[in-house]
């Protein structure tokens, strides 16, 4: 089956190309395609002794599809343990569907090389396992989805999971579980909620199993088929990382200040505004500057959303925003707030960004501030492939929030790791330029030519408007490395958040 690329910038894909999910529809999935969540579990005794028991109980065999969440991020311990059991049992041809992959998952490289894992569907990948995914060893090119696209694929049945393994800090013997409490809290289990609702079977692997009511319930007992005691499903020290910490350089401070000025000039700094900032040092560095602008103007926003950090929590606790909608926590301060703050609300990945949801939070955003590995003259953004051709990320919530927000701002420097970040054409499109309004760089602001209204407002406000080509030329002069050639064949597929293929790398 020939697959149509939704990014017309690139050549057509080779014929008969399969994805880990089989042939991919070339058009978005209609809302009528949404399936009802799974029937409630009817098991009375859900308690199993060990991970190996889940393989027998739920008939995990060659070719099965297993899913995992990434709320412990680079501290996750469960996925490696489950795949080790699969390898020890001699299983082959598994497809894994984790919401994200990190350097901590390096042991999976051996399982890819040995054929235990032959398919990968994920939203983000970084580290040794990302290199293995791009090596050509897998049976089909790995498929990257957005966070909202993953929720859509689960709800529509395109991503059909045999068993979802869910790490949790606390669970009851009947299966209700949470990441908000206990000795190893990670915050709300927003991604795992969707897995548990649609997988054929769901297994919670909990650090502590209690008989008393939970302080919070992220996943109800009716969506869980088995409960397994599993000490330390994640190291909470691995939740925060370089991409979830705000940059502190003078360059980042200048970009953060300009972001606040752009929001103000665009007329969106107002009572009731809503805000999300994506992972990335520059975008997160803008948070306190936006808070300062609200403070000076004596304004109060409605909500903050997305991946939450301590900087977001501080704004809400100061009274600059009414509430927080949290799909995952990016640091310990956010985790603590999710446990104790009554105005800190958990949400599922579907409520956050599923394009088939009736009112996802991303569609209610006033402003989204994002990062970029590359951005091009058409304002297409790449947050997936580095200048050396390596896989260093993925869509995550980037294209979801970019499409939904009233104003989408991309923040980035001129270069990264010696490679230009402003280019004529990105190596691959993660987020289409039609969803990006403005680029903020420490050398100036470039506005998408399609947003003549925004250009007029920023110009009238006296902001430093610079043509994109001027910034691109500056980036080329500053760069010390030339990007490696783009692959002539697909090593990686990128799905559009609404379904169908967006691009490849």
Image: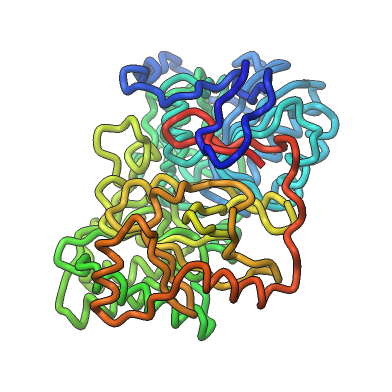
Name the image quarter holding the C terminus. top right
Q: Nearer the viewer, residue 390 or 110?
A: 390
State whether residue 151 is above or below residue 289: above
| Applied colour scheme | rainbow
Going by the image, does 16 lie left or right of 472? right
Examine the rendering and report whether any part of residue 432 can be seen. yes
Residue at 20 percent across and 83 percent down: it is: 296
Residue 472 placement (x, y as % from top left): 57, 69
State whether residue 482 is above or below residue 23: below
Residue with the most extreme bottom position: 250
Residue at 25 percent across and 59 percent down: it is: 274
Residue at 53 percent across and 25 percent down: it is: 47
Name the image quarter holding the N terminus. top right
Examine the rendering and report whether any part of residue 46 can be seen. no
Residue 458 placement (x, y as % from top left): 28, 73
State whether residue 278 is above or below residue 384: below
């Amino acid at each position: 089956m020939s697959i149509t690329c939704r990014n017309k910038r690139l050549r057509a894909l080779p014929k008969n190309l399969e994805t880990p999910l089989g042939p991919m529809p070339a058009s978005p999935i209609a809302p009528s395609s949404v399936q009802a969540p799974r029937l409630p579990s009817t098991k009375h005794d859900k308690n199993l002794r060990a991970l190996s028991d889940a393989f027998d109980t739920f008939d995990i065999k060659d070719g099965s599809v297993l899913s995992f969440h990434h709320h412990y991020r680079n501290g996750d311990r469960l996925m490696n343990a489950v795949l080790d059991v699969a390898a020890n049992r001699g299983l082959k041809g598994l497809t894994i569907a984790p919401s994200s992959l990190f350097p901590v998952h390096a042991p999976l490289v051996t399982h890819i090389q040995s054929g235990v894992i032959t398919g990968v569907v994920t939203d983000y990948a970084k580290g040794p396992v990302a290199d293995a995914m791009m090596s050509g060893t897998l049976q089909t090119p790995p498929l990257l989805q957005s966070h909202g696209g993953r929720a859509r694929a689960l709800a529509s049945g395109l991503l059909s999971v045999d068993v979802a393994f869910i790490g949790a800090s606390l669970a009851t013997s009947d299966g209700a579980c949470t990441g908000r409490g206990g000795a190893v809290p990670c915050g709300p289990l927003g991604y795992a909620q969707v897995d548990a609702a649609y997988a054929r079977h769901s297994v919670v692997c909990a650090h502590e199993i209690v008989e008393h009511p939970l302080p919070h319930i992220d996943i109800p007992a009716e969506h869980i088929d088995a409960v397994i005691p599993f000490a330390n499903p994640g190291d909470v020290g691995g939740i925060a990382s370089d991409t979830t910490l705000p940059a502190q350089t003078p360059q980042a401070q200048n970009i953060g200040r300009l972001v606040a000025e752009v929001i103000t000039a665009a007329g969106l700094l107002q009572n009731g505004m809503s805000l999300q900032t994506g992972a990335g040092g520059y975008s997160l560095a803008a948070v306190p500057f936006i808070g300062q602008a609200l403070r000076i103007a004596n304004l109060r926003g409605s909500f903050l959303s997305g991946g939450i950090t301590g900087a977001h929590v501080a704004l809400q606790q100061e009274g600059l925003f009414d509430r927080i909608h949290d799909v995952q926590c990016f640091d310990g301060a956010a985790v603590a707030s999710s446990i104790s703050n009554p105005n800190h609300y958990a949400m599922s990945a579907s409520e956050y960004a599923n394009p088939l949801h009736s009112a996802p939070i991303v569609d209610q955003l006033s402003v989204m501030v994002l990062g970029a590995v590359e951005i091009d003259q058409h304002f297409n953004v790449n947050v997936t492939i580095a200048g050396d051709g390596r896989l260093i990320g993925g869509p995550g919530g980037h294209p979801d929030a970019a499409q939904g927000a009233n104003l989408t701002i991309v923040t980035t420097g001129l270069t990264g790791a010696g490679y230009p970040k402003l280019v004529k054409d990105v190596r691959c499109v993660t987020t289409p330029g039609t969803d990006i309004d403005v680029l903020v760089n420490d050398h100036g602001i470039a506005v998408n030519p399609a947003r003549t209204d925004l250009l007029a407002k920023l110009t009238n406000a006296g902001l430093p408007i610079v043509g994109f080509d001027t910034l691109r030329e500056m980036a080329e002069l500053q760069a010390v490395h030339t990007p490696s050639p783009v692959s002539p064949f697909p090593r990686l597929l990128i799905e559009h958040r609404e379904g169908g293929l967006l691009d490849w790398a």
